[in-house]
Image (cartoon, helix red, strand yellow):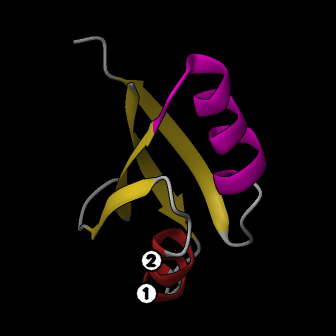
């Protein structure tokens, strides 16, 4: 099982909309709206590293209103 956390910056005022979109992705296990340098933190899981890559590139980063992301791949 592969797990990662993603720190997400979005366009101003889009946090709640983006939160709702992320929660619709089955691999997203939790999502939090935050204050500070990042607007949301999402935790997601996949069976393999290649599936994790697919989730990041095809499902999450293509969502409108996301300005930038930082992905933290969990190793233990």
Whether residue 52 is situated above or below residue 10 in the rendered picture = above
| Disc 1 packing (10 Å; few <14; some 14–19; many ≥20) | few
Instruction: Name the spot of residue 67 as percent of width and height, x first.
Output: 64, 58
Q: Nearer the viewer, residue 42 or 8?
A: 42
Furthest toward the top, the residue is 75
Task: Quote the CA–CA distance across marks 1 and 2.
Answer: 5 Å
- Left or right for 8, reference 75: right
Please check the rendered image and state whether residue 51 is part of the magenta-colored stretch, yes or no: yes
Q: Left or right: where does residue 67 sit relative to residue 22?
A: right
Q: Residue at x 38, y 65 (%)?
A: 39
Residue sitting at 54 percent across and 75 percent down? Answer: 24
Vertically, is 10 above or below 61? below
For the stretch drawn in magenta, what is the main secondary structure?
helix
Across and down, in percent, residue 68 comes to: 60, 49
SS at mark 1 in the image: helix
Q: Is residue 36 left or right of residue 10?
A: left
Label 2: which residue?
19
> Looking at the image, can residue 38 be seen?
no
Residue depicted at x 57% and y 18%: 49
Q: Magenta stretch: residue 18 in it? A: no
Residue that carries the numbered disc 1 in the rendered image? 16
Relative horizontal placement of residue 34, taking residue 23 as reference (left or right): left
Percent from the top left, x then y, of residue 57?
A: 73, 40
> Disc 1 vs disc 2: Cβ atoms closer than 8 Å?
yes
Q: Secondary structure at mark 2?
A: helix
Question: Which image quadrant is residue 36 in?
Answer: bottom left
User: Which residues lie in the magenta part?
Assistant: 46-61
- Is residue 18 placed above or below 76 in the rendered structure? below
> Which residue is nearer to you in this view: 76 or 35?
76
The residue that appears at 44% across and 57% down in the rendered structure is 28
The quadrant of the picture occupied by the N terminus is top left
């Amino acid at each position: 099982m592969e797990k990662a956390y993603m720190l997400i910056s979005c366009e101003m005022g889009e946090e709640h909309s983006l939160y709702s979109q992320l929660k619709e992705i089955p691999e997203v296990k939790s999502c939090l709206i935050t204050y500070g340098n990042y607007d949301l933190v999402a935790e997601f899981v996949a069976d393999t590293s290649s599936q994790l890559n697919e989730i990041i590139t095809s499902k999450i980063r293509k969502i409108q209103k996301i300005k930038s992301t930082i992905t933290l791949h969990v190793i233990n």
